[in-house]
């Protein structure tokens, strides 16, 4: 199944992209070239191409400002996208992933050092953009983004540690996903309202909505990491099992107390890389042990919880409907 990108997301991309490009123009030419490639503006030779990322976070940030009033918070929206872009650049290096958004990952084209520097540069541009912006809530917004980045890093640290552990609990795995993905989604959903100095209860409700939607998004992403087709995900098939990732469906299967879960644990404990047959066996065992259905149900629960937070928040009904549209899109991407 695949879902069409909501019109709000496409429209927000058009609004935020000039801000992103103008900010990236401040970078030195070497770093800008890597950033422009990673952000999907240019090919390896610097020729213009059509951007590949979905730009969900800036769309959520734009909506977040609109929830508080008629103002825009484009610098905040661009800053969140830069943090996201930094995290993907570094993540591909850490995971050794060679493909991103249907293209060779930046580090495979420009080398690891250049890609690390480009990620660092995007992170610093995010802070610069926010703090020099004229919006009244720029300092709390910058503090919120910095805290979300710290949590994103904590989640990534757990994710990497879990690859070497065989005793990861579902609670630990949930914490990792909440930090790795939920923190920046929560920030994207609330930073616009924060930047325009919106009321505190609205900011809190939007952050709670984003945290739940972020967990639902990560569950959907984890399902795609096992059963997603490379044409839909832009990543190699069975990539999470290949990397021995302890994603939520995998940990649900490993901790299920079933024979299939035990067989999966034995398969994943071996020292050698898994063969293609073993990878397909492992995916079947995750399913047999109930990991797939658990993750699908959990994603629905998280989406319901997200909707409840939104229902309680005071905002124009059209903005609420657009938030919901994006939340449903997050969990129904191509399989
Ligand atoms: C510090 C560090 C290295 C952190 C890494 C954290 C990390 C990679 C989290 C994964 C989050 C996620 C679901 C990304 C896909 O977003 P998306 O589908 O919106 O991506 P798109 O922009 O390509 O559409």
Image (cartoon, rainbow, N blue to C red):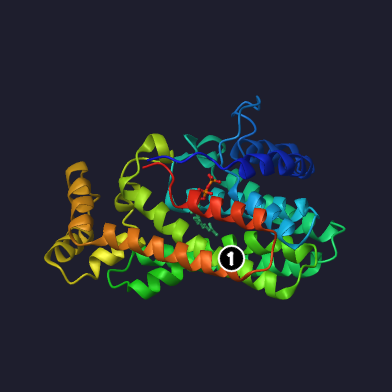
Mark 1 is surrounded, within 10 Å at the Cα level, by few (under 14), some (14 to 19) or many (20 or more) other residues, namely: many
268 relative to 60 in the view: left or right? left
Q: Is mark 1 within 8 Å of ligand 1?
A: no
Q: Nearer the viewer, residue 289 or 148?
A: 289
When asked about the image quadrant of residue 149, the answer is bottom right
Q: Which residue is mark 1?
A: 310
Q: Is residue 175 above or below residue 128?
A: below
| Residue for point 78% across, 58% down | 130
- Where is residue 246? Give x, y as percent: 34, 62
When asked about the image quadrant of residue 250, the answer is bottom left
| Residue for point 15% across, 66% down | 262
- Disc tally is 1
- The answer, for residue 245, to whether it is visible in the render is yes
189 relative to 95 in the view: left or right? right
In the picture as drawn, the residue positioned furthest to the front comes out as 317
- The answer, for residue 120, to whether it is visible in the render is no
In the picture as drawn, the residue positioned furthest to the right comes out as 134
- Where is residue 313? Give x, y as percent: 64, 69
240 relative to 260 in the view: left or right? right
Q: Quadrant of the N terminus?
A: top left
Q: Quadrant of the C terminus?
A: top left
72 relative to 4 in the view: left or right? right
- Where is residue 193? Give x, y as percent: 73, 63
Q: Nearer the viewer, residue 119 or 76?
A: 76
SS of the residue under disc 1: helix
Q: Nearer the viewer, residue 41 or 174?
A: 174
- Where is residue 126? Give x, y as percent: 72, 55
């Amino acid at each position: 199944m695949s879902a069409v990108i909501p019109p709000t997301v496409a429209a927000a991309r058009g609004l935020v992209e000039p801000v992103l490009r103008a900010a990236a123009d401040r970078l030195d030419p070497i770093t800008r070239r890597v950033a422009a490639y990673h952000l999907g503006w240019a090919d390896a030779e610097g020729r213009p191409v059509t951007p590949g990322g979905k730009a969900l976070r800036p769309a959520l940030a734009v909506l977040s400002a609109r929830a508080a009033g008629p103002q825009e918070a484009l610098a905040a929206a661009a800053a969140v996208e830069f943090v996201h872009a930094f995290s993907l650049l570094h993540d591909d290096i850490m995971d050794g992933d060679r493909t991103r958004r249907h293209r060779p990952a930046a580090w495979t084209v420009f080398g690891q050092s250049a890609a690390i520097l480009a990620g660092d540069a995007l992170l610093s541009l995010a802070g610069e953009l926010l703090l020099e912006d004229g919006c009244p809530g720029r300092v709390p917004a910058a503090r919120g983004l910095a805290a979300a980045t710290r949590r994103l890093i904590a989640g990534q640290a757990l994710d990497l540690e879990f690859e070497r552990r065989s005793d990861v609990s579902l609670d630990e795995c949930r914490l990792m996903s909440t930090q790795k993905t939920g923190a920046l989604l929560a920030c994207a959903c609330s930073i616009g309202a924060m930047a325009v100095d919106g009321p505190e209860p609205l900011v809190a409700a939007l952050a709670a909505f984003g945290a739940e939607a972020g967990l639902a998004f990560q569950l959907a992403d984890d399902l795609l990491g096992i059963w997603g087709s490379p044409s839909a995900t832009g990543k190699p098939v069975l990539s999470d099992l290949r990397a021995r990732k302890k994603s939520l469906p995998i940990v649900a299967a490993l901790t299920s107390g079933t024979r299939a879960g035990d067989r999966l644990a034995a398969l994943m404990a071996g020292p050698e890389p898994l063969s293609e047959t073993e990878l397909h066996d492992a995916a079947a065992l995750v399913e047999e042990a109930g990991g797939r259905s658990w993750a699908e149900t959990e994603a629905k629960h998280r989406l319901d919880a997200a909707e409840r937070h939104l229902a309680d928040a005071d905002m124009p009904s059209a903005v609420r409907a657009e938030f919901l549209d994006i939340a449903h899109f997050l969990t129904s991407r191509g399989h």
